[in-house]
Image (spheres, grey):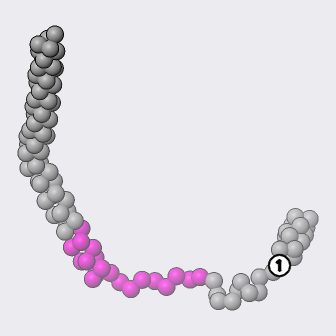
Amino acid sequence: MIAQWINALEAAIESLAAFILQFVYLVYLLIGCMLLIALICAPFLLGYVIYMDRQDAKAKRRASSNNTNATAPEQVKGRAPGLSEHASPFGQTEARAERTLEHPPP
């Protein structure tokens, strides 16, 4: 009876050890595949980074050369200061709109 129990326990331990070994092997295989893919893609990624860096440098050179040749910006004409202080209240504006609708200008 004890011999059967020991044999069953030994078989369970062997199957658990086999499972752990398979799991470790699969993790090792997965990490190896990811590293292989990273090594294959690294030159392309590096080339892309260098290309984008050169494009950025070209754009900055163009922007700096455009700024040196640019003329002074024109002054934008806006509202005169203080006009909002003299704006008519809403009631007068509505009354003026009604008068305009009743008697359109010539």
Residue at point 27%, 83% (across, down):
68
User: Quick check: 15 above or below 75?
Assistant: above
**Which residue lies at the image location 13% right of the left edge and 17% below the top edge?**
6
* The image quarter in which residue 26 lies: top left
In the rendered image, residue 94 lying in the magenta stretch gets the answer no
Q: 66 and 43: which one is in front?
A: 43
Q: Position of residue 19 (x, y in %)?
A: 15, 25
Question: In terms of depth relative to the viewer, which is nearer, 3 or 76?
Answer: 3
Residue hosting label 1: 89
Q: Amino acid at mark 1?
A: Pro
Left or right: residue 57 versus residue 33 is right
Residue segment shown in magenta: 59-78
Q: Return the residue nearer the eye: 93 or 45.
A: 45
- At mark 1, the secondary structure is loop
Given residues 23 and 41, the one toward you in this image is 23
Decide if residue 59 is on the left or right side of residue 90.
Answer: left
- In this rendering, is residue 20 above or below 105? above
Residue at 42 percent across and 83 percent down: it is 73
Residue drawn at x 71%, y 83% as measured from the top left: 84
For the N terminus, the image quarter is top left
Image quarter for residue 85?
Answer: bottom right
